Image (spheres, rainbow, N blue to C red):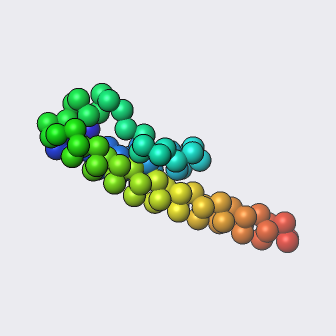
Amino acid sequence: MSYTNGFDDGYKKGYEDAYKKQKKSSTGGFGISEILRSCVSPEVYLTTFTEGYNKGFDNGMFLFNQEQSLKKRVDIILNAN
């Protein structure tokens, strides 16, 4: 848990949501408890958490899609033999 800003926390949450194919949260998936635990202002934490969430979600979705594409290719190759 990052106590200086929320980017790392947000990135982790976004990545996990995307990889599990959960719907992207419009609020970044942050919780009040994360804001209260932070040592910075709630505005800074919320902003950085949301930035991290969005970046993590995009990266997680990209990886998920890459893996699905690879699985389809492997299935095609295996079924061709």
Q: Residue at x 73, y 64 (%)?
A: 72
Q: Quadrant of residue 68?
A: bottom right
| Image location of residue 60, percent across then percent down | 49, 55
Q: Is residue 33 above or below residue 30?
A: above
Is 45 left or right of 28, judged from the image as shown? left
Q: Is residue 12 above or below residue 69?
A: above
Q: Is residue 68 above or below residue 21?
A: below
Is 41 left or right of 25, judged from the image as shown? left
| Image location of residue 11, percent across then percent down | 36, 50
Which of 9 and 74 lies nearest the eye of the viewer?
A: 9
Q: Is residue 8 visible?
A: no
Which of 15 and 48 lies nearest the eye of the viewer?
A: 48
Is 41 left or right of 77, judged from the image as shown? left
**Residue most extreme to the left:** 39
| Image location of residue 80, percent across then percent down | 85, 71
Q: Residue at x 44, y 48 (%)?
A: 14
Q: Residue at x 52, y 47 (%)?
A: 24
Q: Is residue 52 visible?
A: yes
Circle count: 0
Which of 64 and 48 lies nearest the eye of the viewer?
A: 48
| Image location of residue 8, percent across then percent down | 29, 48
Q: Quadrant of residue 46?
A: top left
Which of 78 and 17 lies nearest the eye of the viewer?
A: 17
Q: Is residue 33 above or below residue 70?
A: above
